[in-house]
Amino acid sequence: MFRQASRLLSRSIAHQQPTKTKVAARAFSTDVSATPTEDSPFAQSWKKVIPHIDAPKTPSSYMKPRPPTASAIPTKLTVNFVLPYASQLSEKEVDMIIVPATTGQMGVLPGHVPTIAELKPGVMTVHEGTDVSKYFVSSGFAFIHANSVADVIAVEAVPVDHLDSNLVQKGLAEFTQKLGSASTDLEKAEAQIGVDVYSAMNSALTG
């Protein structure tokens, strides 16, 4: 039934369109109203072919506006820092954060350009006045929005002062040994990940 409906819809839309049409530019999400809207040509064609069934929603029906961008740069950066099982920071207003991006340490201040950064094992620092909090993160992503909101999502994270230096040294030695004796690509990859993570934890403790 739906295959037949799709064929009829495609024919209906094709007959309605002139041979030469000017393609309208897609609106940015900031231009889309908060109330979901119908894809008018599609909905109209659907109603002509199948009037007794509501038209299915298209992706444009779910588009919502981006968070409003302030006319002036705020004095504080709002940070959400979450893990799969817990929330470390929720709408926390701070002066700056520094995240361990795969491209290097990235500082984020209020008014930062919108950015998505992949995180590597390393230290994330949160600056609030004279207070500095440090977290070791294993991996994840940082989403920096135009309204001076930063969402940091990590797979694992722990305050740096909760790391045990003896266990870190032990883990680094174990994975270094495994890397030296690895015989398959999988064993080498797993061992290299362990070396990278424990090396980053060691640097967090000694740096």
Image (cartoon, rainbow, N blue to C red):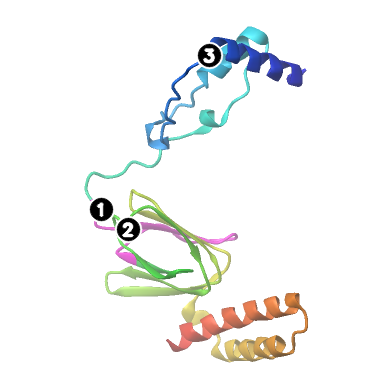
- Residue type, label 3: Gln
Q: Confirm whether residue 21 shows in the render.
A: yes
Q: Tell me the SS state at disc 3.
A: loop
Q: Quadrant of residue 197?
A: bottom right
- Residue type, label 1: Pro
Q: Which is more N-terminal, label 2 or label 3?
A: 3
Label 3–label 2 contact, CB within 8 A: no
Q: Is residue 199 above or below residue 56?
A: below
Judged from this view, the residue extending furthest toward the front is 19
Crowd class of label 3 (few under 14; some 14 to 19; many from 20; radius 10 Å): few
Quadrant occupied by the C terminus: bottom left
Residue occupying the point 41% across, 35% down: 28
Residue occupying the point 45% across, 26% down: 35
Q: Is residue 125 above or below residue 54?
A: below
- Residue type, label 2: Leu
Q: Is residue 84 above or below residue 67?
A: below
Position of 129 with respect to 17 (left or right) is left
State the separation of the CA atoms marked 3 and 1: 48 Å
Label 2–label 1 contact, CB within 8 A: yes
According to the image, label 1 marks what residue? 74
In percent of width and height, residue 158 lies at 52, 73
Q: Which residues are magenta?
A: 73-96
Q: Tell me the SS state at disc 2.
A: strand
According to the image, label 3 marks what residue? 17
Crowd class of label 1 (few under 14; some 14 to 19; many from 20; radius 10 Å): few
In percent of width and height, residue 124 lies at 44, 71
**Between 93 and 4, which is closer to the camera in this rendering?**
4
Residue occupying the point 38% across, 32% down: 31
**Between 80 and 102, which is closer to the camera in this rendering?**
102
Q: Confirm whether residue 51 shows in the render.
A: no
88 in the magenta segment: yes
According to the image, label 2 marks what residue? 77
